[in-house]
């Protein structure tokens, strides 16, 4: 029985260190791999150097140089299959009206065609009182943050100076076979509204932990305009909200 290092024949890079294996099984190279029987790797094991950073230089098994480690890491990263997470596009015709007491802000919104482009359907959020709309998302497993984006414009041209606009993002978990959690909210950073009737595209980057959401779970959401506290004295029209996970 022997301890065996499996390494790439072409460059000596370590692949796997096997303990107490049948020696005759590892005497000959196989498919581009070679085997070193009972190498002296005590120092590497003591220093807890990962096997992928071991290198057989023809004389001994040593730790790779920093440059070799970086090159190996870059190669692994380039060959790694990226994880594609879903992007949710929430359009006015598919939002939930927040018109019952189960919503944190119980105030229905108006869905209408944009007066300047009637081909666009929008949700109108007024300036006097907090109002918004709801939707449901599935948070994928293993994500750490997501980006909330909004495409909006003021209904009336702001005059004089730029205005501020404030939103809130409410969420609650809908765990399988469990009671729905309590609502919580995040006060999204303030947006600056230019003196224009053109649509503006704005985004917020949020950590999953900051919102209190749980990965691999459905969440119920409500995006609201606070109404009080911002300086835009007119309603806004929202054409789309999107949520992208990463």
Image (cartoon, rainbow, N blue to C red):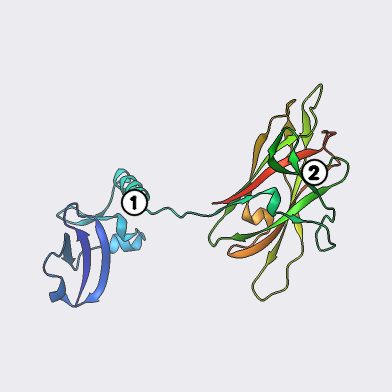
Label 1's element?
A: helix
Q: Residues within 10 Å of mark 2 (few under 14, many from 20)?
A: many
Count of picture labels: 2
Asked where in the image residue 36 lies, by quadrant, the reply is bottom left
* Image x and y of residue 106, in percent: 84, 56
* Image x and y of residue 236, in percent: 77, 38
The residue positioned 66% from the left and 76% from the top of the image is 177
Q: Earlier in the sequence, mark 1 or mark 2?
A: 1
The residue beneath circle 1 is 79
Whether pointer 1 and pointer 2 mark residues with C-beta atoms closer than 8 Å, the reply is: no
Of the 4 image quadrants, the one containing the N terminus is bottom left
Question: Residues under labels 1 and 2: Cα distance?
Answer: 46 Å
* Image x and y of residue 199, in percent: 68, 33
The residue positioned 81% from the left and 23% from the top of the image is 159
* Image x and y of residue 47, in percent: 35, 59
Label 2's element?
A: strand
Left or right for 58, reference 105: left
**Residue 203 image label:** none
Mark 1, mark 2: which one is toward the viewer? 2
Q: Is residue 116 above or below residue 86?
A: above
Left or right for 68, reference 182: left
Q: Is residue 232 above or below residue 168?
A: above
Left or right for 232, reference 87: right
Q: Residues within 10 Å of mark 1 (few under 14, many from 20)?
A: few
Asked where in the image residue 189 lies, by quadrant, the reply is top right
Q: Nearer the viewer, residue 161 or 143?
A: 161
Q: Nearer the viewer, residue 168 or 196?
A: 196
Residue at the far right in the pictured view: 128
The residue positioned 42% from the left and 53% from the top of the image is 82
Left or right for 6, reference 84: left
Residue at the far left in the pictured view: 28
The residue beneath circle 2 is 125
């Amino acid at each position: 029985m022997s301890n065996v290092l499996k390494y790439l024949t072409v460059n000596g890079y370590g692949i796997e260190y096997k303990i107490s294996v049948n020696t005759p099984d590892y005497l000959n190279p196989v498919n581009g791999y070679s085997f070193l029987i009972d190498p002296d790797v005590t120092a590497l094991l003591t220093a807890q150097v990962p096997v992928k950073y071991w290198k057989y230089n023809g004389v001994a098994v040593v730790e790779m140089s920093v440059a070799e480690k970086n090159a190996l890491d870059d190669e692994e990263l380039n060959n790694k299959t990226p994880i594609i997470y879903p992007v949710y596009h929430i359009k006015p015709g598919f939002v939930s009206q927040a018109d019952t007491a189960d919503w944190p802000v119980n105030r229905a919104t108006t869905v209408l065609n944009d007066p300047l482009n009637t081909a666009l359907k929008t949700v109108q959020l007024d300036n006097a009182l907090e109002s918004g709309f709801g939707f449901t998302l599935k948070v994928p497993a293993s994500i750490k943050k997501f980006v909330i984006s909004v495409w909006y414009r003021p209904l009336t041209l702001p005059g004089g100076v730029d205005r501020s606009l404030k939103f809130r993002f409410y969420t609650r978990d809908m765990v399988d076979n469990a009671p729905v959690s309590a609502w919580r909210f995040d006060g999204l950073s303030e947006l600056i509204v230019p003196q224009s009737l053109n649509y503006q595209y704005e985004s917020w980057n949020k950590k999953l932990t900051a919102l209190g959401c749980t990965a691999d779970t459905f969440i119920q959401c409500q995006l609201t305009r606070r109404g009080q506290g911002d300086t835009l004295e007119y309603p806004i029209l929202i054409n789309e909200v999107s949520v992208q996970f990463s």
